[in-house]
Image (cartoon, rainbow, N blue to C red):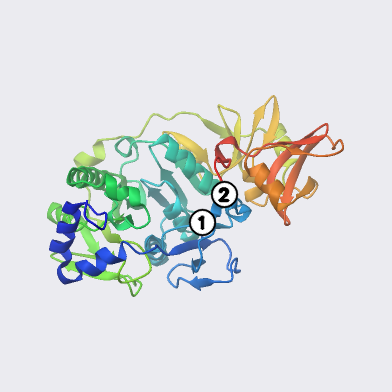
Amino acid sequence: MTEDNFPEAFVRRVQEQFGDESAALLAALNLPPAVSVRKREAAALWEDEEVIPYCPGAVYLGHRPVFTTDPRFHLGEYYPQESSSMVIGAIFHQLNQSRSFKKILDTCAAPGGKSLLVLSAMDDDAILISNEIVGRRNFILQENLCKWSDPRSIVIQNQVKEIPYSETFDCIVLDAPCSGEGMFRKDPGARKEWSLEGVKNCSGIQSELIQEAYRLLRPGGILIYSTCTFNREENEMQCAAMVESDKWFSISDVNMPQQARRVEEDGFTAWRFLPHEGKGEGFFCAIWEKKSSDSREKKRFKGGVQKVDWMPLPKKESGEVEAFLSVTGIPMLRNAHNEVSYFLGNFSEWQALNIRQLGVPLGQWVKKFIPHVGVLRSDLASSNCERVSVTDEQALSLLRGEDLRMEENVSTGWAIAQWKGRDLTWVKGVQNRWSNHYPKEWRIRHL
């Protein structure tokens, strides 16, 4: 490691690639990273917000909040996200204006920021499928999408090469696994893990994912390719290989933020964000349109095995669920585990996938129906449900998974713990306590 705690091989490569500006780039990687978040609503949540103009609801903050101890974070009122990567939302929005994507795939979606950008910009009748193969990361993806509570989303856990929907998708977002050089100041651990072998391995994975994206896209479909790294092997060389394959058109006519450096090389256009030229971290992106298909690719998968994991909820059981809701008649589905979801779209079309979360979770039958916090994040909870006001301290206690103890016996049955007028979590009255039903996998582990 160098005196600046960078791998020596990394420093040499930056100097070769960026020449006279390499010193400024390396110096920027040792500065404190900017704090940026994207809010669900336009209203200010902090006094020191600075608007990020290319992403609606996105702001820089002049301080670094402890997000874990802020109930608004757990309520899904905002999502901490690196500002350079927010450009994916701007790209998608511009392209969708003229192309109107209906079937969208986020191939490597965890922790979920880019899926949330797409959900905020896509048509009402579109469907987003967000995929993450790593189990632990898939749980995080489910949580973040549930907090955003959009019934047009599906979370799956599939190897991309095993997704049996060739020539199906109108748009694919491929934020590829990479060596993470652009995130060195946000993630010091990435410096220690970096190696030339790691760059090579990532490059190989990226090439395979691009090939799978070609298979899955319909002719004329769009691929948005991105990484959070600097090196040419994972960026320009991937683009050059796409040009050489003669399977792709490079798309260049999109408006990009001022700090996005345009990269023009033989046959393609791309954009690079550099930490010494703006507040964000290192990021690279390129936009591609699929040319006409290769029939051999099309035959690789001829439809998948149609499982019957999800079925419409019977009318009687719908009534039990609707007792917790402020609306009736929304499309509800149940799977083999008796989980109930609210989903807008043709669910049967996607049953060959390993679906982990369909739309917005509403609850599950375990002898009796147990409501899910997804009802609350969707603002679907009935006004007839009892509300129990909680303090800041009690809210954090509930988010840690603790029960809410009272001095006197409480009413039996379901209620909603409400923090500052916001529905936080379901609780159930048992003698002198409210039993906590905040999802176990969402609970705060460390403060």
> In this rendering, would 300 be left or right of 435?
left
- At 80% across and 47% down in the image, what residue appears? 384
- At 48% across and 36% down in the image, what residue appears? 356
Q: Answer few, some or many: residues within 10 Å of disc 1's Cα (few below 14, many 20 plus, some between 14 and 19).
A: many
| Kind of residue indicated by mark 2 | Lys
Q: Mark 2 near mark 1, Cβ–Cβ under 8 Å? A: yes
> In this rendering, would 362 be left or right of 156?
right
> In this rendering, would 35 be left or right of 383?
left
342 versus 75 height, above or below: above
Q: Looking at the picture, how far across and down is residue 425, in whole percent?
A: 68, 44
> In this rendering, would 361 be left or right of 239?
right
Which labelled disc corresponds to residue 147?
Answer: 2
Which quadrant of the view contains residue 193?
Answer: top left
Return the residue found at the far right.
Answer: 408
Return the residue found at the far bottom.
Answer: 258
217 versus 26 height, above or below: above
264 versus 149 height, above or below: below
Return the residue found at the far top.
Answer: 367
Q: Which residue is mark 1?
A: 79
Q: CA distance from mark 2 to mark 1?
A: 10 Å
Question: Considering only order in the chain, which callout, 1 or 2, is on the residue closer to the N terminus?
Answer: 1
Number of numbered tags placed on the structure image:
2
Q: Is residue 360 visible?
A: yes
Q: Answer few, some or many: residues within 10 Å of disc 2's Cα (few below 14, many 20 plus, some between 14 and 19).
A: many
| Kind of residue indicated by mark 1 | Tyr
Residue closer to the observer: 282 or 174? 282
Residue closer to the observer: 247 or 219? 247
Q: Looking at the picture, how far across and down is residue 113, in whole percent?
A: 44, 54
Which quadrant of the view contains residue 136?
Answer: top left
Q: Secondary structure at mark 2?
A: helix
Residue depth check, mark 2 versus mark 1: number of the one nearer the observer: 1
Q: Secondary structure at mark 1?
A: strand
